[in-house]
Image: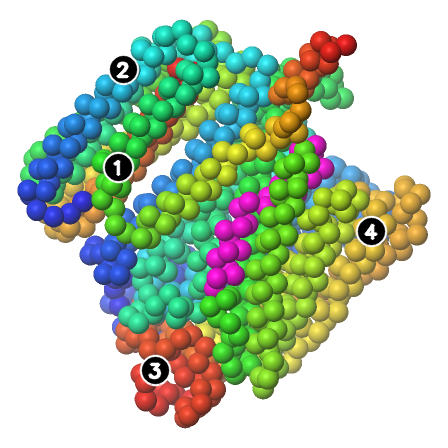
């Protein structure tokens, strides 16, 4: 044991360069306060949750493709309560649906995009030695971790996990099984985590910028993270309030979300009544719409970095991009009720939210257009991260444009709660955000490990994924327009009007499983490259931003010499410069440190 | 490299990290209680009937508790001012009062709760009592948090004054900001629940 | 709050005044609640007093009146804006009934009114 500790200690000393005191293994890798370790912890935990959430979906897709048929092999392990004889019960399908959404959003994408990338890259990009509050940072990760454990554990309580959808609409969620209580407790942990994280991000960005790093020299990624943090800071607390109220409804028999006169299969409910189910939806979407932008903004930031780097020219319209991101963040607080057009909310207010929704699409289009314009005239390097970033642009475009009919009250009557909605937001989040996150992993992997990820495996992963993922989501627009409801556990086979589109269900399922297959290449590549990837220097992509000035992997404290910033973030191909990239920390006239 | 601006203010923002951090935290707290107040309004205007606070709650007790909490806010600000004047002994006295007054508040609150329970006025009784219990309990949790933090800065944490004086002042300032916010929430809770 | 002992003493004098005002306002709001005024007026009085007290605490105890930091002012400004949006929730929920000549606060009331109409 002693030997192991010493070996770790030496390994760490090598890593850490001039780190003064030796840290034990637990301090260095488990309860670490270093933003890079926490970022990697976040990223790996979130990737595992993403895989888990994806697995739930692959199970659901079996039942959609072959309703009533036993699930091969896996079906035997799901338990009698969930899948007797390997045939999935509707109740279990509902659990999978609710938990797929919850896990993907709250335990997968946000922790990876904000907790993972934000933690690892943001302090490096602004030239900071660490986050402003390292201990809070650690608390944030462990709170997230606990929340995740509670969520996973809820599968094993009587009645299984939460089964009222990731939106947990009352009154259904209030009378649901115990899993819902666990869901709420898990959410409170997750909200605490993102609260601590967002305070930390904002303070770090405002306070710890290196000398010369003015706001207009911040990389676009940092701006995206900053706005995201404000969304998390101000939008999550109302959901926390709502979570507390729903917890009270479930545990203390209050009636915050329970109207009078509710009757279930067991007769009238014994409650005081007088509550408002709409209140839950309002409070939920007050968070959950900004949450959509929490999902997308960091992805836009990552794509901005990769695009500028691989086109070898500045990001088109940096100031416009920054203004758009800020405006987007602001507007995201006043569009939430477009999720609620069919609640009987009233036409006056529906019209208001329809208008704000159309307004918020403007900055989104501006950002996307600026990214496309950045490509124009560039000598594009088709590296693996760039492939993902390039795929992001049209995919996010499809997701965004298909959202417009949903934001208009009239077409939403037809489209609400159909597969069209599923297709729309998955295009934004899956081939959109998650592709950008994959791109980010390939892009920053050499910074975290000093090695590149394998190029060939990366290309197989990309091309397989992009084809498979479109096979999954594109048909959803067809089935959705035909009126297929999103929550039907048998894929709608009982409905006469859906008979013509049922065949797509199998097609989409095969797409999903193919998508799963191609992730194997990524998983293998990820672990293989940590030890066997091609060794590279500190700046393998010849990038301009500060994180590439630090050693790979950066030691504790990040920079060997305190960085100073002399120029904007994307000075590629500056006329008259000696190389096609001028690093932010490079003094005017000086040669690039290392090419 | 050390993390900069943990103690001294950054020239261009005019802030140290702690102060900005605590204000951001308070901003999120505003939204948390905002959500609850908004729910209160919504449920109240939607209700067929809504009791006057006095039907269930004891106004004199609530008034005494309000005065107690305001007093603790005053002692808090005096504790901080004493630190600024370099009078550590006075700081200790004021801080002790800041810790003990909310303990008294919680005792009185506990008595109120006990009275409610003995009359079967539980949260499930009506929406009014539900919101009363939820909001006061959540506020109570904030009070407990404040007592712990202030207690720490009165007791073991105060050693820092002799070592890193400025850092200690910043921390007490942040704790004070939080404590005034908790007081501020009660200033709204009291009339909303007891008097209206 | 920063600066010399002189300034701190000035602050302390302010704190004492503010403390007195808070005490007085507390008594006033309690006494006002015993007056037999219509409920909307009662709510207005209580909220105005609460708002005054809250501003006193924020301005002087939390030193917002002399806060010069843009970061804090902007953050709080933003929070206030979104807080107001949040407080519009009841309006958004009740908006079905804007411009309609009946009050339909909830399901129970709806049936009562419907019965009256028949």
Give the residue number, with chain letter if any, for mark 1. Answer: C59
Q: Position of residue B33 (x, y in %)?
A: 43, 33
Q: What whole-number distance in Å separates the C-alpha atoms at marks 1 and 2?
A: 21 Å
Q: Residue at x 68, y 17 (%)?
A: C110
Question: From the image, which quarter does the N terminus of chain B lie in?
Answer: bottom left
What stretch of residues is rendered in magenta? A322-345
**Whether labels 1 and 2 share one chain:** yes
B107 or A392, nearer to the observer: A392
Give the residue number, with chain letter if any, for mark 3. Answer: A586
Q: What whole-number distance in Å separates the C-alpha atoms at marks 2 and 4?
A: 63 Å
Q: Position of residue A504 (x, y in %)?
A: 86, 57
**Of marks 4 and 1, the one in the foreground:** 1
**Whether labels 4 and 3 share one chain:** yes
Name the N-terminal-most of marks 4 and 3. Answer: 4
Query: Image quarter for residue A131?
Result: bottom left
Q: What whole-number distance in Å separates the C-alpha atoms at marks 4 and 1?
A: 56 Å
Which label number is shown at residue A481?
4
Q: Secondary structure at mark 2?
A: helix
Tell me the crowding category of disc 4: few under 14, some 14 to 19, or many 20 or more residues within 10 angstroms, Cα based. some
Q: Secondary structure at mark 4?
A: helix
Which label number is shown at residue C27?
2
Left or right, A473 with respect to A255, comes to right
| Circle 4/circle 3 CB separation < 8 Å | no
């Amino acid at each position: 044991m002693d030997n192991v500790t010493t070996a770790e200690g030496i390994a760490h000393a090598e890593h850490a360069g001039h780190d003064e005191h030796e840290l034990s293994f637990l301090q260095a890798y488990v309860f670490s306060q270093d933003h890079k370790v926490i970022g990697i912890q976040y990223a790996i935990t979130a990737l595992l949750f993403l895989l888990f959430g994806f697995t739930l979906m692959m199970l659901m897709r079996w039942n959609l493709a072959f309703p009533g048929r036993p699930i091969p092999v896996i079906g035997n392990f799901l338990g009698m309560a969930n899948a007797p004889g390997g045939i999935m019960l509707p109740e279990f399908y509902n659990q999978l649906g609710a938990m797929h959404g919850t896990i993907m959003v709250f335990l997968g994408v946000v922790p990876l995009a904000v907790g993972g990338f934000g933690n690892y890259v943001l302090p490096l990009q602004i030239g900071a030695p660490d986050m402003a509050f390292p201990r809070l940072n650690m608390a944030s990760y462990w709170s997230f971790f606990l929340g995740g454990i509670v969520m996973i554990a809820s599968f094993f309580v009587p009645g299984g996990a939460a089964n009222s959808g990731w939106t947990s609409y009352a009154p259904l969620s209030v009378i649901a099984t115990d899993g819902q209580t666990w869901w709420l407790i898990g959410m409170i942990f997750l909200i605490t985590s993102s609260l601590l994280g967002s305070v930390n991000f904002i303070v770090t960005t405002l306070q710890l910028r290196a000398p010369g790093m003015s706001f207009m020299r911040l990389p676009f990624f940092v701006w995206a993270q900053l706005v995201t943090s404000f969304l998390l800071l101000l939008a999550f607390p109302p959901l926390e309030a709502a979570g507390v109220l729903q917890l009270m409804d479930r545990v203390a028999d209050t009636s915050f979300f329970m109207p009078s006169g509710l009757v279930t299969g067991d007769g009238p409910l014994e409650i005081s009544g007088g509550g408002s189910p709409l209140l839950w939806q309002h409070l939920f979407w007050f968070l959950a719409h900004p949450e959509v932008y929490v999902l997308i903004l960091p992805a836009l930031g990552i794509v901005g970095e990769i695009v500028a780097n691989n086109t070898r020219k500045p990001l088109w319209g940096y100031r416009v991009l920054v203004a758009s991101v800020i405006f987007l963040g602001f507007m995201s607080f006043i569009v939430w009720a477009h999720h609620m057009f069919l609640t009987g909310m009233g036409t006056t207010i529906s019209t208001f939210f329809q208008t704000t929704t159309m307004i918020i699409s403007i900055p989104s289009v501006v950002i996307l257009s600026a990214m496309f314009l950045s490509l124009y005239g560039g000598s594009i390097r088709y590296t693996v991260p760039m492939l993902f970033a390039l795929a992001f642009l049209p995919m996010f475009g499809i997701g965004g444009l298909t959202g417009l009919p949903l934001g208009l009250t009239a077409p939403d009557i037809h489209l609400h709660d159909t597969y069209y909605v599923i297709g729309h937001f998955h295009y934004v989040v899956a081939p959109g955000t998650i592709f950008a996150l994959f791109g980010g992993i390939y892009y920053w992997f050499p910074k975290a490990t000093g090695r590149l990820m394998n190029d060939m495996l990366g290309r197989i992963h990309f091309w397989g994924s992009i084809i498979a993922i479109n096979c999954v989501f594109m048909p959803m627009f067809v089935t959705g327009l035909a009126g297929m409801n999103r929550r039907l556990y048998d894929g709608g086979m009982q409905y006469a009007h859906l008979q013509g589109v049922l065949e797509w269900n199998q097609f989409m399922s095969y797409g999903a499983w193919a998508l799963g297959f191609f992730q194997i290449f990524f998983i293998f590549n990820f672990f293989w490259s940590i030890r066997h990837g091609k060794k590279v220097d500190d700046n393998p992509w010849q990038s301009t931003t500060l994180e590439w000035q630090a050693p790979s992997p950066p030691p504790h404290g990040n920079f060997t010499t305190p960085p100073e910033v002399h120029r904007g973030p994307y000075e590629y191909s500056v006329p008259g410069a000696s190389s096609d990239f001028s690093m932010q920390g490079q003094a005017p006239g000086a040669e690039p440190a290392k090419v | 490299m050390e993390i900069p601006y943990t103690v001294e203010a950054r020239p261009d923002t005019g802030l140290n990290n702690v102060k900005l951090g605590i204000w951001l935290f308070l901003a999120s707290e505003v939204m948390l209680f905002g959500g609850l107040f908004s729910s209160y309004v919504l449920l109240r205007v939607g209700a067929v009937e809504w009791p006057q606070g006095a039907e269930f709650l004891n106004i004199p007790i609530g008034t005494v508790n309000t005065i107690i909490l305001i007093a603790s806010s005053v002692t808090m600000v005096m504790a901080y001012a004493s630190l600024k004047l370099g009078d550590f002994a006075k700081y200790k006295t004021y801080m002790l009062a800041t810790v003990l007054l909310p303990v008294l508040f919680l005792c009185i609150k506990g008595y109120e709760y006990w009275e409610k329970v003995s009359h079967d006025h539980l949260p499930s009784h009506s929406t009014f009592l539900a919101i009363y219990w939820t909001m006061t309990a959540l506020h109570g949790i904030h009070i407990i948090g404040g007592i712990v933090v202030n207690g720490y800065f009165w007791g073991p944490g105060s050693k820092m004054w002799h070592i890193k004086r400025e850092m200690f002042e910043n921390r007490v300032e942040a704790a004070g900001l939080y404590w005034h916010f908790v007081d501020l929430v009660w200033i709204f809770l009291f009339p909303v629940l007891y008097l209206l | 709050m920063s600066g010399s002992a002189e300034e701190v003493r000035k602050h302390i004098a302010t704190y004492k005044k503010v403390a007195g005002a808070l005490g007085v306002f507390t008594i006033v709001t309690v006494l006002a609640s015993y007056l037999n005024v219509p409920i909307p007026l009662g709510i207005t009085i209580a909220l105005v007093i609460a708002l005054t007290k809250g501003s006193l605490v924020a301005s002087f105890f939390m030193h917002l009146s002399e806060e010069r930091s843009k970061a804090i002012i902007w953050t709080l400004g933003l929070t206030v804006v979104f807080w107001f949006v949040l407080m519009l929730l009841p309006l958004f929920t009740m908006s079905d009934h804007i411009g309609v000549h009946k009050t339909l606060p909830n399901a129970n009331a709806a049936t009562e009114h419907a019965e009256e109409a028949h």
